[in-house]
Image (cartoon, helix red, strand yellow):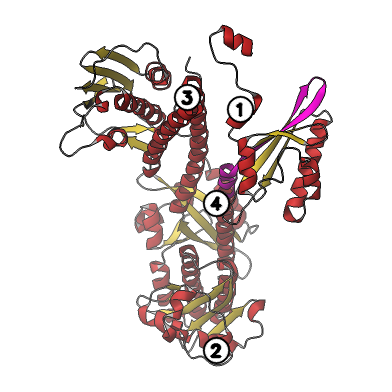
Amino acid sequence: MNRLSEQNGLPAAPPAQTILDAITGPVAVLDPTGIIIAVNRAWHDFGAANGAPTAVAGGVNYLEICDRAVGADGPCARAAAAGIRAVLAGKTTFSLEYPCHSPTVTRWFRLQVSRLLHDGVTYAVAAHHDITDRVLIEQERQALLARAHRHQEQLRSLAATCARITLEEMPASIFREVTEQARRIVGAHWASTHTIPYVLWPEDPIIVSVSDKYRAFSRAAIAESGVGIYTHVVQTKRPLRMTSEELSHFPELQGVRNTEADLLVTEGLIAVPIPAAPGGMLGVLMLSDKERGDFTADDEAILVQLSQIASVAAENAVRKRAERESRERLWATHEHASVGIGETDASGRFLTVNKGLSSITGYSRDELLAMTVFDLVPPDVVEAEKALYDRQVGGELKTYTLERRCIRKDGTNVWLHVSSTAVFGVHGQFQYSVRVIQDIDQRKRFEQRQSLLVRELHQRVRNTLAVVEALASATARSATHVRQFNQTFSSRIAALARTQTLLTDDYWQTALLRDMLLCELQPFEEKRHQRFTLEGPEVNLTADLAIPLSMALHELATNAARYGALSVRKGCVAVRWDVETTDGMRALRLTWVERNGPPVEPPAHHGFGFTLLERVLQAQCRATVRLSFEPGGLEVHIELPLTMNRAIGNVATSGVNPDPR
């Protein structure tokens, strides 16, 4: 290889150690016995960062170190030793992913061991690759899935609770069920319902539900702890949600305290009013000491729904004892509930509907009463809905719940959570069905957006890695020494980082052309002398155009600072651009003009900047680039088509192509 380099007039190929040191990840070469015979600089840095600067240097048996590992790292270390031995015994490769955390940094690595044959002897090359970003992304995805799964389970429990309490005939049983289920669904250690005294309500106005943590406490102690909260919610008629720290600043909210009550741990609380007729209340539903974390807005929404369902059920129970009075209260609660509620006959035709259902569907009350539930179901799922409803009418399903789309009056679709509960007569005949409908469109859109962002993040990581790989390769080919490589590569990475910052700051992952130019030219701005001018309309560039164009602008600015107009005091750069539309296609036309700089001559050889302008921009952006080396200054004309719509997740790579040929 060295002779071939000398024949081509190039320096001799670098030694193996220099090549190893150029690899960014930690690499070690092991002999057949497992002794380290060569490592690169990154290996030393990796060991120093993890508290072992000399323990794994040359001459040390790496396999013995792994075999002696104890504690949490022991199993991974022994697995690594077994894999290395397998490679030394003839296996081609071995791979292992493992955590490598420090007190301040959480990281994961992938150990890749490859077999190396030299003069009939088998060696092992062990390389460690940082996979922290990938692991963190996967953990975030799992967290989002877990949250979605928990939310789904809560909705199921909410629907089941609704079905149970609608069958209760006594208000006391309804409030007891709601209190118990509220604690279980949200996940709290104690819950209580304080009802406003009324002749038909429970004899005991306070109902308590606790986990094993508070089994030893008396019901009176828990009840007294909630008196202050109950009074506050009754007065304000609004939900209250506080952390333990916030609650500590309001001792008046903790009610009457005694020795036993003082031992209760009130780590945050949430309380919602149980509504009655307009302006009235049936009581307050309260939770405290959440099992995991603080109470959230989702928890509050669940409690609000439970309180509303409990209100409807309680009013229905009272109706059996005082028909006219309770019917008026039940109808008021039914009408002002934030969820959609309707009753349907055996054919699915609406018998009654509330304002919430009208608001969700966009139809008036009279229009809904002339329709069936199937008129609101999209054609592709209407048969499935009919099958469930027929089974319910036939008595096979007393209650069913589902999430589906609904066709609104204006033709748009909205996602709904539907709970349908059948009401049967004394002889088991179907009378009507009660449908509780919740608008979950916002939650569905949130889930879709999270999924979109996860896909976008995966795509962005792959694209960025491709760009970095291409920059490293191109810079290495043109650099004559390590210092030049470091300086050039660092400046190009910095330019890429600035553009990535512009893209990240924008919701749709686009960057303004003017901001990209300012990132490169702002350092040359002077108060007494105008070093550059920017003229053109506002243009937003998507990531697949912004990244390669930003690199091209960086190369132009760097060239101007070293050899062109920005290298002298009176030199200046003028950048003008415009967007033209031809045959329905939009194109960006940009001109870079340098003046008052040193005399310009065509370069004797073309470097990375020339390749980026004339070949990479053409390959990646379908751009047309023309360079004019005028005596008065360099002129560059760039024309590239603009995409009308931003594509997400369907581009394999973007930015700089590792091989622009």
Tell me which corner region of the image, top left, top right, bottom left or bottom right, holds residue 238. Answer: bottom left
Residues under labels 3 and 2: Cα distance? 80 Å
Residue labelled with disc 4? 144
User: What label does residue 255 carry, if any?
Assistant: none
User: What label does residue 475 carry, if any?
Assistant: 3
Q: What residue type is labelled 4?
A: Leu
Q: Helix or strand or loop: what does disc 2 sit on? A: loop
Q: Earlier in the sequence, mark 3 or mark 2?
A: 2
Q: Do the residues labelled 3 and 2 touch (CB within 8 Å)?
A: no
Residue at x-position 80% and y-position 50%:
68
Q: Which amino acid does label 2 sit on?
A: Asp
Q: What residue type is labelled 3?
A: Thr
Q: Helix or strand or loop: what does disc 1 sit on? A: helix
Front disc: 4 or 3: 3
Residue labelled with disc 2? 204
Residues under labels 4 and 1: Cα distance? 45 Å
* Boundaries of the magenta span: 115-140
User: What label does residue 18 carry, if any?
Assistant: 1
Q: Earlier in the sequence, mark 2 or mark 4?
A: 4
Tell me which corner region of the image, top left, top right, bottom left or bottom right, holds residue 324. Answer: bottom left
- Residue 551 position in % (x across, y down): 38, 28
Q: Where 389 falls versus 341 (above or below)?
A: above
- Residue 424 position in % (x across, y down): 59, 66
